[in-house]
Image (tube, grey):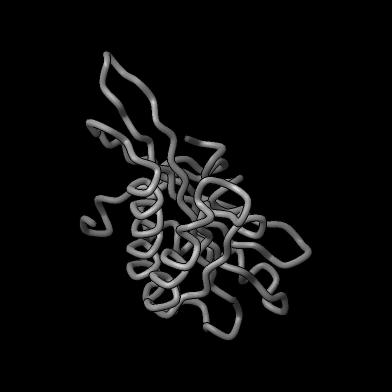
């Protein structure tokens, strides 16, 4: 990943934001109701498109701060990748790695402004027991857990399968 000031997210209400601005906005959201408990969710989804005969994969990563039982706000960013032959397994690994890389980048920044006792962090992975990704669950959950994060899969992975998917 690039330096913090070169990575931008989109807030549906405030527009384009740097990582630092996003972290500050998350902190303000938490400060509005300091007695509440929060979930910080990071999830990535992808969609394949054909553009001029080439395959283009849109990867969208969402960051959601959920005030449990009392609302949420989210931020998202899109990366376009051109590939010769988009394989589902490669896309799922890339989605998971993008979420992990972002978590490793923003968690230290968030911990500077919000105590870890105020929130749970979850990485949402767009895999489930019923679909074509069922054989990958142990692998990608292991990747996330091995990096010290909590992994959620379908149907609990709404950060990837609903929020990020909305922008692919």
Residue 23 in which image quadrant? bottom left
Of the pair 131 and 99, the residue shown nearer to us: 131
Total number of numbered labels? 0
Left or right, 71 with reference to 140: right
Residue 112 seen by the camera: no
Residue in the picture at 69% in, 65% down: 67
Q: x, y percentage for residue 131?
A: 58, 47
User: In the current view of this chain or complex, which residue is farthest to the right?
Assistant: 69
Residue in the picture at 32% in, 63% down: 101
Residue 37 in which image quadrant? bottom right
Q: x, y percentage for residue 88?
A: 40, 43
Residue 24 seen by the camera: yes
> Is 147 drawn above or below residue 43 in the view shown?
below
> Is 15 drawn above or below residue 124 in the view shown?
above
Residue 31 in which image quadrant? bottom right
User: In the current view of this chain or complex, which residue is farthest to the top?
Assistant: 52
Q: x, y percentage for residue 102?
A: 36, 61
Residue in the picture at 70% in, 71% down: 33
Of the pair 120 and 84, the residue shown nearer to us: 84
Residue in the picture at 34% in, 40% down: 87
Of the pair 135 and 146, the residue shown nearer to us: 135
User: In the current view of this chain or complex, which residue is farthest to the front?
Assistant: 135
Left or right, 73 with reference to 149: right
> Which quadrant: the N terminus?
bottom left
């Amino acid at each position: 990943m690039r330096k913090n000031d070169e990575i931008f997210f989109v807030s549906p209400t405030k527009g384009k934001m740097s990582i630092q601005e996003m972290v500050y906005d998350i902190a303000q959201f938490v400060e509005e109701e300091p007695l509440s408990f929060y979930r910080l969710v990071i999830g990535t989804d992808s969609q394949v498109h054909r553009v001029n005969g080439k395959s283009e994969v849109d990867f969208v990563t969402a960051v959601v701060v959920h005030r449990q039982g009392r609302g949420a706000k989210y931020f998202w960013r899109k990366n376009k990748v051109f590939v010769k032959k988009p394989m589902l397994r490669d896309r799922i690994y890339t989605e998971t790695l993008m979420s992990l890389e972002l978590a490793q980048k923003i968690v230290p920044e968030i911990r500077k402004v919000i105590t870890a006792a105020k929130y749970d962090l979850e990485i949402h992975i767009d895999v489930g027991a019923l679909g074509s990704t069922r054989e990958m669950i142990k692998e990608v959950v292991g990747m996330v857990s091995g990096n010290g994060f909590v992994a959620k899969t379908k149907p609990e992975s709404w950060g990837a399968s609903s929020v990020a998917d909305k922008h692919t």
